[in-house]
Amino acid sequence: MKRIIFRTNAARPLIWGRVVLGTLLVFVSAAASQASELIYYPLNPSFGGSPLNGSVLLGSAQAQNKHTDPNTGAARAGMEPKTPL
């Protein structure tokens, strides 16, 4: 029994179309994904940032502060005694 093989070129345009489409997608996505340079804007006023950020940064630092002064008692609650000066 002899096999009959039919060779057609019907699939070639479909393959080349996919190759061309894939190549175009690579170039289009590469052009759309170009990054720009990063620019540093300082936030802290001590390092050149806006002076208006000072109170916000101080409030954030005080809210995160978990350290307590060992010299202050709970009864005094951080109040210093008045001096005659």
Image: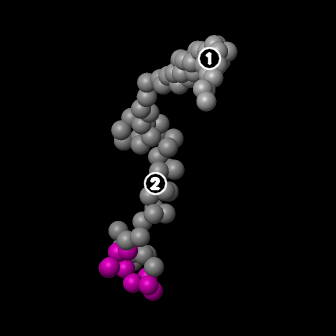
Q: Quadrant of residue 48?
A: top left
Q: Earlier in the sequence, mark 2 or mark 1?
A: 1
Work out which quarter of the rendered image holds the C terminus and state it: bottom left
Whether residue 25 is visible here, answered yes or no, is: no
Instruction: Find residue 21 and report its horizontal and vertical position in percent.
Output: 61, 18
Q: Amino acid at mark 2?
A: Leu
Assign a secondary structure to mark 2: helix
Instruction: Find residue 6 and report its horizontal and vertical position in percent.
Output: 64, 19
Q: Please state which of residues 55 and 63 is positioned toward the viewer in this rendering.
A: 63
Q: Please state which of residues 19 and 37 is positioned toward the viewer in this rendering.
A: 19
Q: Quadrant of residue 81?
A: bottom left
Q: Nearer the viewer, mark 2 or mark 1?
A: 1
Assign a secondary structure to mark 1: loop
Q: Amino acid at mark 1?
A: Arg
Q: Quadrant of residue 4?
A: top right
Numbered label attached to residue 58:
2
Residue at (41, 32) in percent of width and height: 40
Q: Please state which of residues 83 and 76 is positioned toward the viewer in this rendering.
A: 76
Give the Cα separation between the discs numbered 2 and 1: 79 Å
Whether residue 51 is visible here, answered yes or no, is: yes
Numbered label attached to residue 48:
none
Work out which quarter of the rendered image holds the N terminus and state it: top right
Numbered label attached to residue 7:
1
Say left or right for 50 vs 3: left
Residue at (41, 43) in percent of width and height: 44
